Image (spheres, coloured by chain):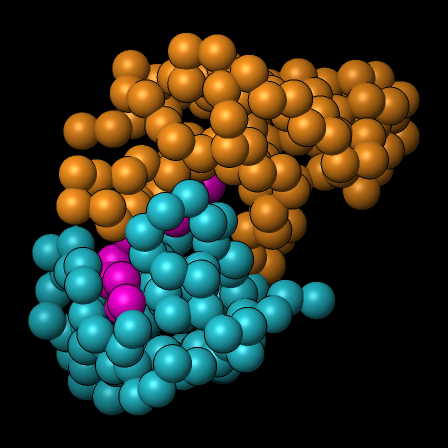
Amino acid sequence: GQQLNQSPQSMFIQEGEDVSMNCTSSSIFNTWLWYKQDPGEGPVLLIALYKAGELTSNGRLTAQFGITRKDSFLNISASIPSDVGIYFCAGLFIFSGGYNKLIFGAGTRLAVHP
Amino acid sequence: DTEVTQTPKHLVMGMTNKKSLKCEQHMGHRAMYWYKQKAKKPPELMFVYSYEKLSINESVPSRFSPECPNSSLLNLHLHALQPEDSALYLCASSPRDWGNQPQHFGDGTRLSIL
């Protein structure tokens, strides 16, 4: 089945540092999504990527859809304390019948030290 | 603020109780989803409704019974649950369950089974 390998599993950084995390798969995905989940809340969509090679920014966040369609990365620049949370990559896999299924990575837990 | 609203936010129930979780969205989305999320894990898909009809059941035990009364509402009826069913239950919606549209999540119901 489709699986995503997300790394790193966790990061502990100083405020102001840049952060990078990525997801890889042996399967091809049509859409890559990055979500952030804070404690006690649901995942919030940060960035959606629809085309191989696409590079998209959302404020201090930048994400890219890998050219092979099997990977994606997320960068956070100049981290701040509110960046703390769990970041999930997710690939949208489209089956032959046309319906889709969201496949999640295991998540990257980010802690920011002031 | 999430556009997918889930109630209640917390629920504690005994193994013999019957309760229901509710989810509502007013974005005009025609696909709605139930996910189960255990601590420190990504969400796991349980059910998919497309145009108010059940399209995917990920082999979920019958003690979980979904219902979609109309295009804006999704319920999850619970009966005779087990302690291992304690988890965060997330509802999500997307314009359709095909194509490349992202899913948007509610904040979840934290369920504890005594």
Residue at x 63% of width, y 66% of height:
B2
Image height of A13 relative to B58, above or below: above
Residue at x 18% of width, y 63% of height:
B55
Image height of A24 relative to B11, above or below: above
- Which region is colored magenta? B40-50
Image height of B60 relative to A74, above or below: below
Is B65 magenta? The answer is no
The colour one sees for chain B in the rendered image is cyan
> Residue A20: image x %, image y %?
66, 17
Is B49 magenta? The answer is yes
Instruction: Name the image quarter holding residue A93.
Output: top left
Image height of A48 relative to B68, above or below: above
Left or right of A74, for residue B36:
left
The quadrant of the rendering that contains the C terminus of chain B is bottom left
> Residue B36: image x %, image y %?
34, 57
Residue at x 54% of width, y 78% of height:
B26
Can I make out residue A92 in this image? yes
Q: Main secondary structure of the magenta part?
A: strand
> Observer-nearest residue: B58 or B54?
B54
Residue at x 41% of width, y 18% of height:
A69
The colour one sees for chain A in the rendered image is orange
> Residue B62: image x %, image y %?
10, 71
> Observer-nearest residue: A46 or B64?
A46
The quadrant of the rendering that contains the N terminus of chain B is bottom right
Total marks in image: 0
